[in-house]
Image (tube, rainbow, N blue to C red):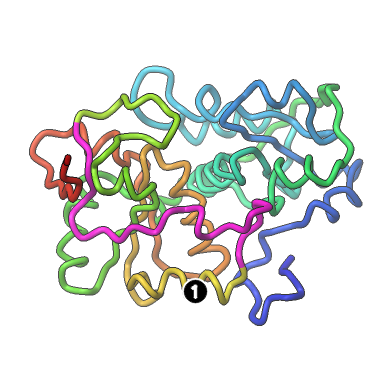
């Protein structure tokens, strides 16, 4: 659903409003899933009928730095009682960072029928809409087999090769972290422990467009016209191959969603290794613009 005030529509019908969700509560074909950074938030109150996904426990391999397999994703969706034809509506905290991350990961895993509730948990709560602490009971299902879509994921060596395209003007590299992370002054967001990576800075040639510039104050996405102007002003145009990254790929998933789903960019990949891999790797090029006083 696009906003009626938009002068141009979004490329794909992948957003629903909080009002739309409220009108469809109880519809057995509409399945709500909450995905938060703070996994305890769900237990303090959530949209009636919504189920919870723990992005780390449910999506990440328990030992390796990687994702679970498509077969394990299939099992997860079966445990959630999902069917192939269900319309899955994702939402969460942090202006839908983690819901966008779930959208990207599930898309990568081959899952269809995905949408985001625009504005996420923040907007639902701000509007005083109905919440419950009851956990919706579901009957397990046999979800169909899945096949990964590798065209939307970038790996470290692919990013390294991509730097040639960036230098030639055929590609773009999008760093959506805060300006201080980009400069190398800090290695994590404000108010977070500065840990998990040995070096600060950014990948050479990257353009810094913080994720929050794509969102309004209420957590909803800006209009297609505003988004187009935002990215094109930094040379991130639809004719280029684009790779987006942040620290562990949740914020860059938000920007990946804006570029691919809302603007229709044809070739955008999310580098899930992001800065925690690049900044810890031996021998990879780094630019750092911060100079201590």
Quadrant where the C terminus lies?
top left
Circle 1 packing at 10 Å, graded few (<14), some (14-19), many (20+), is: some
Horizontally, is 141 left or right of 193 in the view?
Answer: right
Horizontally, is 59 left or right of 119 in the view?
Answer: left
Q: Residue drawn at (56%, 31%), measured in percent from left and top?
A: 37
Where residue 159 sits in the image (x, y, percent)?
Answer: 23, 52
Q: Residue drawn at (65%, 39%), measured in percent from left and top?
A: 92
Q: Residue drawn at (42%, 69%), measured in percent from left and top?
A: 231
Where residue 71 sits in the image (x, y, percent)?
Answer: 52, 32
Q: Within the magenta stretch, is there residue 200?
A: yes
Residue situated in front as seen by the camera: 146 or 132: 132
Residue situated in front as seen by the camera: 60 or 15: 15
Q: Is the magenta region chiefly helix, strand or loop?
A: loop
Q: From the viewer's perspective, is residue 219 above or below residue 185?
A: below
Q: Answer yes or no: is residue 137 visible.
A: no
Helix, strand or loop under label 1: helix
Residue lying at the far left of the rendered structure: 283
Looking at the rendering, the stretch of residues picked out in magenta corresponds to 199-222
Residue lying at the far bottom of the rendered structure: 7
Residue situated in front as seen by the camera: 143 or 81: 81
Quadrant where the N terminus lies?
bottom right
Where residue 10 sits in the image (x, y, percent)?
Answer: 62, 71
Q: Quadrant of residue 170?
A: bottom left
Residue situated in front as seen by the camera: 151 or 203: 203
Q: Within the magenta stretch, is there residue 217?
A: yes
Q: Residue drawn at (68%, 26%), measured in percent from left and top?
A: 41
Count of number-bearing discs? 1
Where residue 221 sits in the image (x, y, percent)?
Answer: 62, 60
The residue at which mark 1 appears reads as 228
Residue lying at the far front of the rendered structure: 293
């Amino acid at each position: 659903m696009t906003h009626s005030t938009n002068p141009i529509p979004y490329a794909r019908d992948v957003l629903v409003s909080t009002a739309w969700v409220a009108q469809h509560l109880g519809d057995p074909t509409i399945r709500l899933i909450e995905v938060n950074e703070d996994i305890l938030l769900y237990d303090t109150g959530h949209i009636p009928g919504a189920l919870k996904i723990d992005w780390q426990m449910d999506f990440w391999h328990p030992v390796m730095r990687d994702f679970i397999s498509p077969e394990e994703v299939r099992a997860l969706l079966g445990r959630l009682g999902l069917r192939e034809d269900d319309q899955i509506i994702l939402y969460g905290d942090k202006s839908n960072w983690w819901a966008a991350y779930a959208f990207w990961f599930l898309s990568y895993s081959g899952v269809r029928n995905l949408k985001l509730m625009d504005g996420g948990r923040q907007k639902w709560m701000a509007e005083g809409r109905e919440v419950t602490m009851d956990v919706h009971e579901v009957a397990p299902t046999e979800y169909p087999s899945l096949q990964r879509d590798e065209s939307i994921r970038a790996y470290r060596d692919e990013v390294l090769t991509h730097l040639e395209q960036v230098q030639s003007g055929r590609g773009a590299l999008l760093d959506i972290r805060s300006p201080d992370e980009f400069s190398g002054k800090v290695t994590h967001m404000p108010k977070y422990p500065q840990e998990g990576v040995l070096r600060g800075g950014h990948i050479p040639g990257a353009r810094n467009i913080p994720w929050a510039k794509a969102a309004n104050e209420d957590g909803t996405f800006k209009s297609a016209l505003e988004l187009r102007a935002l990215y094109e002003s930094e040379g991130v145009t639809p004719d280029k191959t684009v790779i987006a990254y942040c620290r562990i790929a949740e914020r860059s998933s938000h920007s990946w969603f804006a570029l691919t789903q809302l603007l229709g960019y044809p070739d955008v990949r999310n580098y899930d290794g992001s800065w925690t891999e690049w900044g810890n790797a031996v021998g990879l090029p780094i630019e750092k613009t911060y100079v201590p006083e």
